[in-house]
Image (cartoon, rainbow, N blue to C red):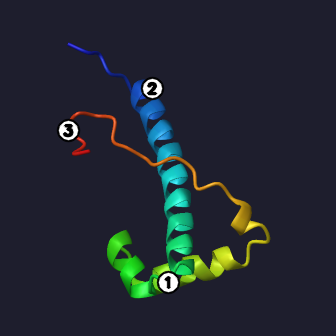
Amino acid sequence: MIDTTRRDYGKRIRHLTRVLEDVSGDRDLAMYRAHQHGMSYEQVALLALATVDQVRETIVLLRLEEDVDGWDDGPVWVGMHPTSGW
């Protein structure tokens, strides 16, 4: 039996929060790039499981970034656990 402590769960929460932050930033950039390549706000929203307003706001904010076109797309995130479905 594994003895999981509060500290272990604290580490897990911090780690997963960092992963979520990284993944959401990569997703936002992918939404921006998809729209640049002709995908409508509605199409992006459907794929991103987001509202059209959320997608539009994300894309508008990224357009304001001075060097967004030079940003790296980052990794393609893949589930690491056997039950992740990937």
Q: Would you place residue 2 above or below residue 74 in this image? A: above
Q: Measure the C-alpha gap from mark 1 to mark 2.
A: 47 Å
Earlier in the chain: of badge 1 and badge 2, it is: 2
Q: Position of residue 17 (x, y in %)?
A: 49, 46
Q: Which mark is residue 58?
A: none
| Viewer-nearest residue: 13 or 65 | 65
Q: Which residue position is annotated with label 3? A: 83
Foreground tag (1 vs 2): 1
Q: Measure the C-alpha gap from mark 3 to mark 2.
A: 25 Å
Q: Which residue position is annotated with label 2? A: 7
Q: Position of residue 21 (x, y in %)?
A: 53, 52
Quadrant in the rendering for residue 45: bottom left
Q: Measure the C-alpha gap from mark 1 to mark 3.
A: 34 Å
Q: Would you place residue 44 above or below residue 27 in this image? A: below
Earlier in the chain: of badge 1 and badge 3, it is: 1
Quadrant, the C terminus:
top left
Q: Which residue position is annotated with label 1? A: 38
Q: Position of residue 62 (x, y in %)?
A: 65, 74
Quadrant, the N terminus:
top left
